[in-house]
Structure formats: structure tokens, C-alpha cells
Image: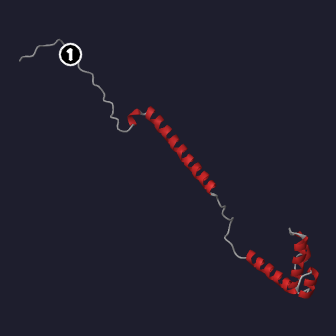
Amino acid sequence: MAKRGRRMSARSVVERLKGSPMAKERLLVLLENLGGTHPVSEGSRKLGIGPSRLQRLREIMLTAALGALEPRRPGRPRVRISMEGRKILELETKLQDLREELDLARIREELALLLPRLRRGQKKARRLRPRPVAGPSVPRAV
């Protein structure tokens, strides 16, 4: 069964990464050692370090890779807000609430001016009935 896709070498992948040339060379030697193409003695000779240091670097690299592959919470990480930022956010929220209350008070005032009978605690205006027109006054008997 033929594999699909382009074959990639470790060198071409490592060269595209961001990092110093020394770190890239160390990574290549460690990958070649892990892949079984170069023994520890040849890798340590290439880097100019001892075999125990090469093995320690390999362990550090694998531990870092394993930690990077651990499952994490989905989505973006939460943004940490400083105390000043929290205070500003709190004040902005309070300002928005006060603006809403002010708008409501203005609307209530307009309604009270347009519809005076609907104000609370106000009695309805009584209609005055016209009094009957009185004729000549007649004295009453006492």
C-alpha cells in the first residue's frame, strides 16, 4: 500500500521553526537519536557534550513535548483582569445603570406632564355642576 503525500525530512521541518541555530541543531541531533539513525555517542560528539548530558536533553525535550500535548480546556483562555481593570469595569457598569435610571426618570416626568390625572396620589378633578338659576328670592316662613 503506497503512502500518500509528500515525505518530509526532520531537517526541513526544524528549519521552519523559530529559534536559534544552536537550538535547531540540538533538536535535529535529538530527533535523529530518537529515530535510531544516530547513536548517543555520535550525537554527543556532534554537539560537543557528554553522553549523559545528551540523554538529559532528550528527557527534557520529551517531557516538554508531552506537557504541550496534554488536553486543555476548549476555547480561548480567560483573560486575567487586574484590580484596576476590575474597578474600571465596575464603574462603567454603574455608569450605564445610572444613565438608564436617568432616562427612565425623564420618561416618567414627560408622562406626568402629559397625563396629569395618572399621577399617583392625586384625586380626580371633580366636575362642577352648574347651579340652577334662582328666580326672585321668596322669604321663607319661619
Height in image: 58 above or below 110? below
| Outermost residue, left side | 142
Q: Position of residue 25 (x, y in %)?
A: 90, 75
Residue 31 quadrant: bottom right
Height in image: 135 above or below 102? above
Height in image: 79 above or below 51? above
> Is residue 7 at least partly visible in the picture?
no
Would you say 6 lies left or right of 134 here? Answer: right
- Which residue sits at x=19%, y=13%? 135
Say few, some or many: other residues with alpha carbon within 10 Å of mark 1 (under 14 / 14 to 19 / 20 or more): few
Q: Nearer the viewer, residue 4 or 23?
A: 23
Would you say 55 lies left or right of 94 here? Answer: right
Would you say 94 lies left or right of 64 here? Answer: left
- Which residue sits at x=50%, y=37%? 106
**Which quadrant of the rendered structure holds the C terminus?**
top left
- Which residue sits at x=46%, y=36%? 109
Q: Position of residue 23 (x, y in %)?
A: 87, 73
| Outermost residue, top side | 136
Q: How many marks?
A: 1
The residue beneath circle 1 is 134
Residue 1 quadrant: bottom right
Residue 79 quadrant: bottom right
- Local SS, label 1: loop
Q: Nearer the viewer, residue 21 or 5?
A: 21
